Amino acid sequence: MRNPFNPACLDVRAFVQSGGVLAGTLGLVQLPRVNDECIPGAGKREVAWSARGELRRAEAADPELWLHLDARTCVPMACQRCLGEVDVDLVVERWFRFVASEALAAQQDDGSEEDLLVMAGDFNLHSLVEDELVLELPLIPRHLACPVQPRLQLADQAFESAAPVPDKPFAALAGFKPGKGV
Ligand SMILES: [Zn+2]
């Protein structure tokens, strides 16, 4: 049977209420915010993703609509130490709860451990996959052990010796107020 749900235009309520499942692959070229952080040619890499809906508190007057997203890929980035190519694994495994409006999401955000999304009849799962992968991108991609001698090492050392951590020998004493209660 053909899956009635379109990941790029998902009726969230119907998907979750039916315990729907969707899975697919996306070329990195379809996720420009991830692709742009990678080295040229990364676009032919693929992201495998899956999503499933889960209705919780189904008997309650206000059942909760949850979505579990799983996405994984391996992207080639430029190592910030040797500038060579480094493969970075990106893995997303996350629960989301849908709420009715932006206002509710803002109101409940602080008290919720899970991530909140705003309910939609045309929700774009591909954009969610992209959003979550962007969050997983390392700020400073680098090899655990660079295959070649890093060209930046000298610069690193110069930087470190030029910017010593300020020494504050008296900082620990600042809290002492002699004389009080003595
Ligand atoms: Zn490296």
Image (tube, helix red, strand yellow):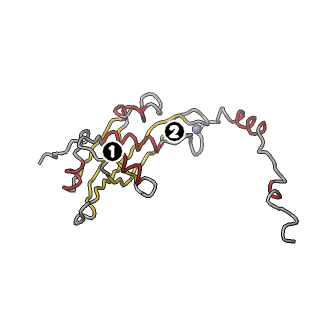
Give whichever of 27, 103 is nearer the camera. Answer: 103
View extreme (bottom): residue: 182
Q: x and y percent of residue 15 in the render? A: 21, 51
For disc 2, the marked residue is: 86
Q: Quadrant of residue 27?
A: top left
| Position in image of residue 69 (x %, y %) | 34, 50
- Numbered mark located on residue 96 in the image: none
Residues at badges 1 and 2 in contact (C-beta under 8 Å)? Answer: no
**Element at badge 2?**
strand
Considering only order in the chain, which callout, 2 or 1, is on the residue closer to the N terminus? 1
Horizontal and vertical percent for residue 172? 80, 57
Residue in the picture at 48% in, 41% down:
137
Where disc 1 sits, the SS reads: strand
Pointer 1 local density, CA inside 10 Å: few below 14, some 14–19, many at least 20 = some
Mark 2: amino acid: Val
Check mark 2 vs ligand 1: CB closer than 8 Å? yes or no.
yes
Name the image quarter holding residue 112: bottom left
Amino acid type at circle 1 is Ala
Where does the image place residue 125, in percent across and percent down from the top left? 30, 43
Q: Farthest residue in the left direction? A: 1
What count of labels does the image hold?
2
Q: Does 114 sit left or right of 20 as displayed?
A: right
Q: Nearer the viewer, residue 159 or 175?
A: 175
Name the residue that disc number 1 marks: 48
Front-most of residues 159 and 102:
102
